[in-house]
Amino acid sequence: MKIGIIGAGHIGGTLTRRLRELGHEVNVANSRSPETLADLERETGATAVWAKDAAADADLVIVSIPQKNVPDLADGIVDARKPDAPVIETNNYYPQQRDGEIAAIEDGQPESAWVAEQIGAPVYKVFNGIFWKHLLERGIPAGSPGRIALPVAGEDGPNRELVHIVVDQLGFDPVDAGPVSESWRQQPGTPVYGKDFGVEKTRAALAEAAPERTAEWSARTA
């Protein structure tokens, strides 16, 4: 597949490495010039591009940037992807730690729904709760004992199937976490966030989640 990745930090850079190992064609961009990604380009064989060009003709687009920077993306940033190609977003809202207050999220809008609104395209939420080193090193074949499960929130249909295939190729068990309107179940502060659970524990943790933001993950903590 041709995959465009916008963001080359811990998760974006790790996905660049792993997806190239799997033989996918990867265009990767950060918030600066392609030249700043020369080392990653040499290491992986990915093609460094400007962010506005990352999604061009892509079968899959991944957005992996700080939440506060999403509104700074160019208008129509993912519009050049192939018709109806899925968009994954891996972001988390860290109000106290990095992002400051985003009022819509504080008022209850799921983080991924806010991202989808900002970029003008539906999204799938996945890879947001796994430590980047585990994403890099702990993928194992399907059926192996101890395989980590990753929740995937988004709409049903062929695009979900494609996202699940990619998660499986990377060495993890995809778990249907419902639509994006339910993606709060895997946000920071929820029982599944940051855990390396298997399938059954992941499903149980998603079911146990509450929509209210916990004090550590809110800008409005008294």
Image: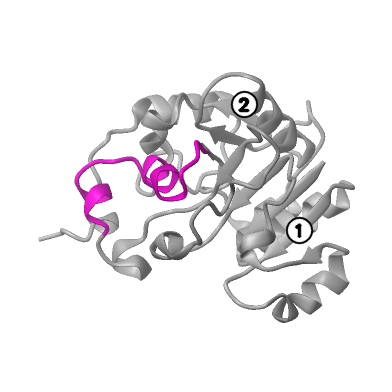
Question: Is residue 107 part of the magenta span, yes or no?
Answer: yes
**Secondary element at image label 2:** helix
Please state the horizontal and vertical placement of residue 184, each as a whole percent of the image. Answer: 36, 37
Task: Answer with mark 1 or mark 2, whichever residue precedes in sequence.
Answer: 1
Q: Is residue 36 visible?
A: yes
Residue 27 has which mark? 1
**Mark 2 packing: few (<14 Cα in 10 Å), some, or many (20+)?**
some
User: In the rendered image of this protein, does residue 113 appear above or below residue 26?
Assistant: above
In the displayed structure image, the side of residue 178 where residue 174 appears, left or right: right
Question: Is residue 100 part of the magenta span, yes or no?
Answer: no
User: In the rendered image of this protein, does residue 47 appear above or below residue 150?
Assistant: below
The residue stretch that appears in magenta: 102-123
In the displayed structure image, the side of residue 19 where residue 198 appears, left or right: left
User: In the rendered image of this protein, does residue 207 appear above or below residue 95?
Assistant: above
Please state the horizontal and vertical placement of residue 81, each as a whole percent of the image. Answer: 67, 44
State which quarter of the image contains the C terminus.
Answer: bottom left
Please state which of residues 66 and 72 is positioned toward the viewer in this rendering: 72
User: In the rendered image of this protein, does residue 174 appear above or below residue 70?
Assistant: above
Please state the horizontal and vertical placement of residue 57, each as a whole percent of the image. Answer: 75, 46
The three-letter amino acid code for the residue at tag 2 is Arg
In the image, what residue occupies the spot 36% across and 61% down?
Answer: 94
Residue for badge 2: 160
**Secondary element at image label 1:** strand
Farthest-out residue, left? 222
In the displayed structure image, the side of residue 189 where residue 143 appears, left or right: right
The three-letter amino acid code for the residue at tag 1 is Asn
Displayed quadrant of residue 208? top left
